[in-house]
Amino acid sequence: MYQISFRLYMCYTKTMQNPDEKYMRMCFELAKQASGKVAPNPMVGCVVLDKNGKIISKGYHEKYGQNHAERNALLKLKNNEAEGGTIYVNLEPCSHYGKTPPCVDLVIEHKPKRVVIGMKDVNPEVNGISKLKAAGIEVDFVLEEEAQFLNRRFIKTMTQKLPYVVLKTAATMDGKIAAKTGSSKWITSEKSRELVYTMRKEFDCIMTSSNTVIADNPSMSQTRWRCVLDKNLRTDKSAKIYRNNTYIASEQNTPLKDGELDLEAVLKELYARGIYSVFVECGGTLAGALLKAGLIDEIYQFIAPKILNDNEGLSCFNGENITEISQAKSLKIYEVKYLDPDILIKSVFSSS
Ligand code: AOF
Ligand code: ZN
């Protein structure tokens, strides 16, 4: 009974959804079509309605360096069909000359009555909203949080000049990534491990530690770059990972912090090299240090239905001196996938 009424309620809320939310969600879907093709720029979609509320054009930012979403949507119109209408776009229209001219000028030329925006641009060069208002166009915001979540990588790189960092772990149900002997092959299923290979392609670089290179000799070849944290240059130059472009951070090229490599300095160096997203695959030492330094944006946690039942088994995150549960780091889970037999939990830190 409850099931049925819940379903009816969902249908009702879907059909009754506020039109601004409906068209903004359409912008999100358009924007997502460019996932992986526009970084470090944002994913942006645009929907144009005429004065009667009919959709007359759609567009999205398709490829890095090419036309922005608004331009792609508005250039499809022949006459002044958008006059008095509404333009939906999930990011404030730009007002600067970058690789393309300012979208806000083109928006104003089309004389819409209203522009509905998902989020304000964090790019300090952009001030499209005040230009729209000065031209007498109404400006409204809708689904701001969702819009910011969609472009969380863009927000991080633009505001912090650091790559977006996602850490992957694969553990038993008691949070162990290996037995005390180091034995870890395999905790998760082949299906989960194959999914990791696909995930890697969403990133510019894989980061790992000298411990992982020495223990597992992975090739991690699916990304443009690799980064090995090897303070004392302990890894063998013939390790598989070095067959492709790899940046080795050691005490020779990286400042130290509390006697260890300064991880933020490493990330800054990667950013300076045009690396905007990093996928970290490592053991508990590096994972714990990144966590402690607050440098992780997101965690992809694979959990296998296994229990090691040994306190000395190796943990996902090595740390110390935590006495209160209130000191635990909090995350927000945004996706859970059942991979049969494992599960994958994707979560972001609340501050992201
Ligand atoms: C995009 N796509 O649809 C919108 C963007 O170098 P440019 O000319 O491509 O400008 C990039 C900036 O433009 C970007 O950082 C963001 O602030 C703004 N808006 N960018 O790539 C878009 N609307
Ligand atoms: Zn633009």
Image (spheres, rainbow, N blue to C red):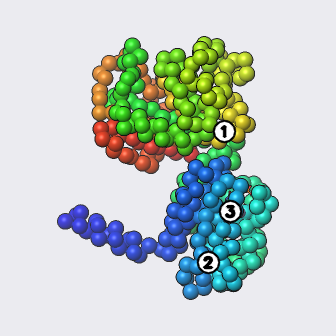
Tell which tag, 2 or 1, sits nearer the viewer.
1
The tag earlier along the polypeptide, 3 or 2, is 3
User: The N terminus lies in which quarter of the figure?
Assistant: bottom left
| Mark earlier in primary sequence (1, 3) | 3
The quadrant holding residue 144 is bottom right
Q: Amino acid at mark 1?
A: Ile
Circles 1, 3 touching at the beta carbon (< 8 Å): no
Residue at label 2?
86
Q: Residue at x 66, y 48 (%)?
A: 40
Which residue, given by chain and number where applicable, does mark 3 sit on?
A: 68
Amino acid type at mark 3: His
Give the alpha-carbon distance from disc 1 to disc 3, as whole Å. Answer: 22 Å
Ligand 1 near label 1 (Cβ, under 8 Å)? Answer: no
Q: Estimate the x, y position of residue 230 in percent, counting from the top left.
A: 62, 19
Question: Sequence-wise, which precedes: disc 2 or disc 1?
Answer: 2
Real-space CA distance between mark 3 and mark 2, rounded to the nearest whole angstrom:
18 Å
Could you say where residue 97 lies in the image, as x and y percent from the top left? 80, 60
> For the residue labelled by badge 1, is the local secondary structure a helix, a strand or a loop?
loop
Q: How would you rate the neighbour count of disc 2 (Cα within 10 Å): few for under 14, some for 14-19, many for 20 or more?
A: many
For ligand 1, give the image quadrant: bottom right
Whether 52 is drawn above or below 265: the answer is below
- Crowdedness near tag 1: few (<14), some (14–19) or many (≥20) residues, C-alpha within 10 Å: many
Q: Position of residue 61 (x, y in %)?
A: 64, 61
Q: Quadrant of residue 115?
A: bottom right
Give neighbour class at mark 3: few <14, some 14-19, many 20+ (Cα, 10 Å).
Answer: many
**Helix, strand or loop status at disc 2:** strand
Residue at mark 3: C-beta within 8 A of ligand 1: yes
Give the residue type at disc 2: Thr
**Residue with the mark numbered 1:** 275
User: Farthest left residue?
Assistant: 1
